[in-house]
């Protein structure tokens, strides 16, 4: 019978056992689970294989098309480096994960790229309905092939850029994930068709994602009166170095719509910004802005008793000096629990022979 460590501890009543587990350093918990639980070892092996594949993709020359099965199904990618960055944000950090009680959440994906975010949404919310926008022809073609290959239902792909009006605009072709509305001085741009986001906000939206490379303030200002239909909103803010910043306007739009914000820094920034700054495709700052409704926001009080325990106090409290002592005490406790309180669990002979 395969039991998780959590189930083992649930059956292990007693304040001493619970105190031991609560104050055990993470490396000790890792090795204890690795020795005792076969599915944990398999999970670690899968993780190593994924990291090796990410390293391979990151080492490829920029803008080299290739395929990967890191998401389970063959996925066509157009740039390994940008894919790795998106994968780590979307699948490892899960920055687009949101709470919902809707069995079929409605999601708008502005800037879908090759479909990594769509794959995440479909894995997290299998019955979700998605409308996805991607204007760049080469990127859109890869997106369309990826979605058709997997066979996701309820996904509408639209080869348009989001803007404040239906028109045609010059578009800078970057070749991976950085395409944007062209500005004065930009080279290698093409013409793309645009649509208004507000035309898609006439119904409740569970999640709105906007990574549209500098057009976000213009687009949200155009549909500010409809943002009340949106429960969760992610927008990546791009500060164009040659233009006035619009962060204050963007924040005002979101807060006036009743959102509470979390703002995270994305781009590499200068440690001495008064002396110099870094530019990436003409941008001197990028921020991830998470906008959510306060009524559904879960808050973890990091100052609550027992939430944060200084590492030194952990050792002092139980009188243990080194992680090896911790591991030995932990393993003996786990073995005692398994042998005396749980029927049917298989303990590896390796564990019994160590101590």
Image: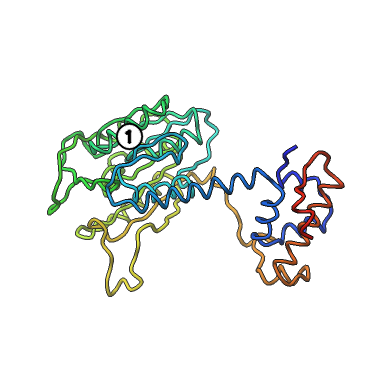
In the visual, does 86 lie left or right of 97? left
Q: Residue at x 52, y 30 (%)?
A: 102
Foreground residue among 290 and 221: 290
**Does residue 73 sit above or below 173 in this rendering?**
above
Q: Residue at x 81, y 38 (%)?
A: 344
Foreground residue among 294 and 131: 131
Q: Which residue is mark 1?
A: 143
Q: Residues within 10 Å of mark 1 (few under 14, many from 20)?
A: many
The image shows a total of numbered marks equal to: 1
**Does residue 239 sit above or below 163 in this rendering?**
below
Q: Quadrant of the N terminus?
A: top right
Asked whether residue 192 is in view, the answer is yes
Asked whether residue 229 is in view, the answer is no
Q: Quadrant of the C terminus?
A: bottom right
Q: Percent x, y for residue 345?
A: 78, 41
The image quadrant of residue 201 is: top left
Foreground residue among 3 and 165: 3
Q: Percent x, y for residue 74?
A: 40, 35
In the visual, does 19 lie left or right of 102? right
The image quadrant of residue 220 is: top left
Colour treatment of the image = rainbow
Q: Percent x, y for residue 39?
A: 65, 43
Q: Tell which residue pokes out farthest to the right in this image.
A: 340
Question: Callout 1: helix, strand or loop?
Answer: helix
**Does residue 206 sit above or below 319 in this rendering?**
above
**Does residue 256 sit above or below 151 in this rendering?**
below
Q: Residue at x 78, y 68 (%)?
A: 318
């Amino acid at each position: 019978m395969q039991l998780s460590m959590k189930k083992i501890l649930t059956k292990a009543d007693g304040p001493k056992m619970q105190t031991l587990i609560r104050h055990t350093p993470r490396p000790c918990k890792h090795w204890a689970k690795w020795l005792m639980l076969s599915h944990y070892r398999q999970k670690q092996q899968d993780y190593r294989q994924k990291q090796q594949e990410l390293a391979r993709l990151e080492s490829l020359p920029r803008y080299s098309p290739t395929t990967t099965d890191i998401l389970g199904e063959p996925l066509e990618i157009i740039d390994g480096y940008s894919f790795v960055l998106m994968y780590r944000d979307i699948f490892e950090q899960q920055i687009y994960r949101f709470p919902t009680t809707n069995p079929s959440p409605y999601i708008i994906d502005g800037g879908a790229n090759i479909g990594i975010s769509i794959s995440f949404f479909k894995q997290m919310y299998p019955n979700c309905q998605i409308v996805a926008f991607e204007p760049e022809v080469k990127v859109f073609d890869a997106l369309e092939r990826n979605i058709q290959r997997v066979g996701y239902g309820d996904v509408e792909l639209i080869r348009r850029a989001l803007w404040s009006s239906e028109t045609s605009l010059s578009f800078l072709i970057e070749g991976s994930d950085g395409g944007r509305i062209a500005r004065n001085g930009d080279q290698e741009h093409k013409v793309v068709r645009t649509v208004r986001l507000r035309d898609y906000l006439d119904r409740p939206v569970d999640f709105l994602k906007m990574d549209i490379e500098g057009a976000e303030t213009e687009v949200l200002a155009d549909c500010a009166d409809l943002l009340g239909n949106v429960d969760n909103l992610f927008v990546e803010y791009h500060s164009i170095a040659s233009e006035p910043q619009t962060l204050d306007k963007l924040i005002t739009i979101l807060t006036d719509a009743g959102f509470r914000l979390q703002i995270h820094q994305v781009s590499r920034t200068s440690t001495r910004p008064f002396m110099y700054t870094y530019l990436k495709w003409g941008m001197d700052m990028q921020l991830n802005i998470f906008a959510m409704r306060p009524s559904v926001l879960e808050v973890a009080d990091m100052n609550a008793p027992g939430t944060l325990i200084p590492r030194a106090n952990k050792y002092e409290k139980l009188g243990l000096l080194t992680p090896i002592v911790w591991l030995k005490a932990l393993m003996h406790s786990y073995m005692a629990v398994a042998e005396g309180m749980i029927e049917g669990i298989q303990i590896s002979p390796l564990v019994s022979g160590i101590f």
